[in-house]
Image (tube, rainbow, N blue to C red):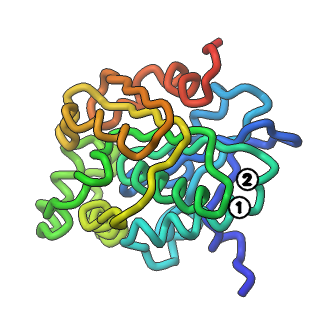
Amino acid sequence: MVRTWEQRWLRSLTVVERPGLSVVCFPHSGGSAGFFAEWAPALPPEVRLLAVQYPGRGDRFRERPVGDVLTMAAGTAAELLETARETPCVLFGHSLGALVAYETALALRDAGVQPLRLCVSSSPPPELAAGGRTHLGADEEFWTTLCELGGIDADIAGNTELRSVLLPMLRSDVRASETYRPRPGTAPLSCAVRCYHGDGDPLVEESTQPEWARVTTGDFALWVRPGGHFHLRQDLAGLVADTVQVTPV
């Protein structure tokens, strides 16, 4: 079956004729590909910016949300394989996106095209990611929790009509994160892994972050940044530069 543009997983946020590198960004629960549009001005001209569009949001709004990390990763990896052999890639995942990015890296590795780096942000490591009952809460409780974490814009938080539209997608994403289990016996990656943690993150214990080193035999680095769970809103240029390993302008 040929997928339409709307059904595909990757969105190009920059136009680069002959990219030397692709940065592939994976959004958080409730996030869309457009969340990473602000990265574009901070990237070198030879770097292409791609972002994953999960079903149930943006131009895939009419599709049923996918509440499963492995399904999200499989769809993304299949499309990345169309170009990854010619253009190396760096994967960056935030929160739920970190787990999807990790599983995508494994899928690429198993297909013989490992990413240059895996960058994970605001997420417990795979072995500790399972658990949590937030997705089982009543609508009001569930919505309030997400608002308190800063994942819902203030101008949306009080809109009851929009809330009813967004709740199924948000609940599906949180369910995907809270029910994720890494596959037993998975061999570690060999690419470099960089981990970003927001100081004071109420969802992720800083003490767990060094455990991300277990997913690779390659280099590992941890950067604790100000800003809590959504530290991405702080010093964006520095974060982008670190992700692509260049000196910020």
The residue that disc 1 covers is 81
Q: Is residue 166 left or right of residue 207?
A: right
- Residue type at mark 2? Ala
Q: Is the residue marked by circle 2 packed among few (<14), some (14-19), or many (20+) residues within 10 Å? A: some
Query: Do the residues under discs 1 and 2 have CB atoms within 8 angstroms?
Result: yes
Q: Secondary structure at mark 1?
A: loop
How far across and down, in percent of the image, does residue 227 sit?
30, 26
Please state which of residues 90 and 200 is positioned toward the viewer in this rendering: 90
27 to 245, vertically: above or below: below
Q: Is residue 65 left or right of residue 10?
A: left
Outermost residue to the right: 17
The residue that disc 2 covers is 84
Please state which of residues 13 and 199 is positioned toward the viewer in this rendering: 199
Judge whether residue 165 can be spotted in this image: no
Q: Quadrant of the N terminus?
A: bottom right
How far across and down, in percent of the image, does residue 218 sit?
50, 36
How many angstroms separate mark 1 from mark 2 (CA)?
5 Å
Please state which of residues 145 and 195 is positioned toward the viewer in this rendering: 195
Tell me what residue is drawn at x 32 percent, y 23 percent: 224
Q: Is residue 104 left or right of residue 41?
A: left
Q: Quadrant of residue 191?
A: top right
Tell me what residue is drawn at x 44 percent, y 68 percent: 70
55 to 117, vertically: above or below: below
Tell me what residue is drawn at x 38 percent, y 57 percent: 30
Outermost residue to the bottom: 1
How far across and down, in percent of the image, does residue 61 sit?
51, 70
80 to 90, vertically: above or below: below
Q: Secondary structure at mark 2?
A: loop
Q: Is the residue marked by circle 1 packed among few (<14), some (14-19), or many (20+) residues within 10 Å? A: some
- Residue type at mark 1? Leu
Judge whether residue 42 can be spotted in this image: yes
Tell me what residue is drawn at x 41 percent, y 48 percent: 98
